[in-house]
Amino acid sequence: MKAFALGLALAIVTGSLTSLHAQQIAGVAPDSAAVRCVGCGGPKRFRRAAEAMFGSELIPQVWNRWIAGDPTARVGIHSWESNLEHGWAWDPDHFGTNQFGHPYGGNLFFNSARSNGYSFWGSAPFAMAGSLTWEYFGETNRPSINDLANTTLGGITIGEITYRLSSLMLDNRSTGARRVFGEIGAALVDPVRAFSRLLDGQIGRVGPNPADRLPSQVRGSVALGYQHLDRGPLGATVRLANQGFTFVTVAYGDPLAGDVTHPFGAFQLEAEFATPGPGMLSQLRLGGALAVHDLKRSERANQQLLLAMHYHYYNNQAFESGGQGFSGALVSRYPVGKKSSLRTELWLTGFALAAIKSDYGVDSATVSPHETRNYDYGPGVGGRVLARFDHGTRWFIDLAYQAFSIDVLNGAAHDHFYQTLSSVWQIRVHGNLAVGERDLVYRRTSHYPNHPETHTRDAQVQIFLALGF
């Protein structure tokens, strides 16, 4: 996971910087026989997609069995019969394995189809098919309900975003060092697509790009800074070790500018890498627009209804939460003077399956895999309110509040209710260099059938330098 996290950060930065200098050219991309646009797909190659999907499962299976010596990888006729006979269960794997490892695997299954001519909707079933195949035949453990949800939904969200990021990096008209770095960056983000391009002889071939390779805008930043975290019950918080961190953001497209002609024509990505901590990847938040409906367009205001798919992963010393699902939002933007604007978002969010830390679970850092969990599972619902005021590219401030209720299906608690309040300010000081601060307060109330009710308050404060692109 550390290798992927570092590769993802480097690829996003390198590829995005490279792509911003490329020219948007209409025409047919050599990515497949007749790819009209990034969102469209092209001629479907089912056999190639199925082989890529099974290959994405075979490699970790061989590694687990013959190199890592994992007993759960010693599959065969007896384990397959047992899995088919006994059916589904909830697995006890560590948080990082279930909430990041499985969604990342689903991303490979999804892109097995996406890189072989299938559209977003056509690729989605491959994420589920890959998960089902692994659950029944890839390990001796009983098929896992949480793995199916995480691999399928999380894999679809990660998969489409990595596919579009790789499209940003792949400039088919470029040559020399720019071409080399673009291909490397795209391969780090979407290795399945890189393999397909290699088989088709497209790496290094010069030709036209898809007409929509570049959306109306791509904005982002890389921030380096210091943070401290506090955690614990109300009135008895514990100051944790200071951390250095890197925070990467990418805003791809703009739904209010008409970029959502296909799913994920606009998406947001936030990734944080921090040390020391339980893992290098301490945060990953992804959300992509599936469809939009304009309510109002004028010089005074733009308003839009938006349907989105989302995934989040928090795994740091203060709080632990993950999940995926669907959201609906009312998005509005109001011009303020000639350079400023106010953007508001009202979200109603549903989690198909969410994971949240339990006060009475065993610390996952002290146990071996396949022994126990320190978090609970269940569906959830909630909402989010966000307001952002920006003065052109000079400075901005964000304020956001969200609240969610998780009904536990498997775990120690009966339910969890949590709220977060966050603020971010950033001001450009020279060129694309900016300074800023990010604050977050996380409150959770948990009800347990066999333990006392708990109330926790965790907090995060960050100070950083950010380079925009």
Image: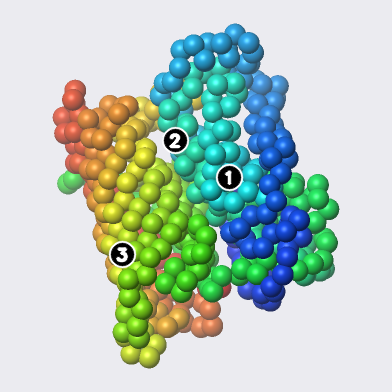
Compared with 425, 268 (above or below) is: above
Mark 3 lies on a secondary structure that is strand
Query: Which residue in the protein does label 2 denote?
Result: 149
- On the picture, is 188 further left or further right than 229? right
Question: Residue 165: x, y in percent?
Answer: 60, 59
Among numbered discs 1 and 2, the one appearing first in the sequence: 1
Please give the name of the residue rendered at 47% of the width and 31% of the height, measured from the top-left corner: 147
Residue denoted by label 3: 330
| Amino acid type, mark 2 | Ala
Question: Considering the image in quadrants, where does the N terminus appear?
Answer: top right
Q: Secondary structure at mark 1?
A: helix
Q: Which residue is mark 1?
A: 123
Q: Name the amino acid type tagged 1.
A: Ser
Image position of 43 (left or right of 397): right
Q: Is residue 347 left or right of residue 95?
A: left
- Proximity of marks 3 and 2: CB atoms separated by less than 8 Å: no
Q: Position of residue 94 (x, y in %)?
A: 46, 31
The answer to whether residue 136 of the structure is visible from this angle is yes
Q: Is residue 314 above or below residue 298?
A: above
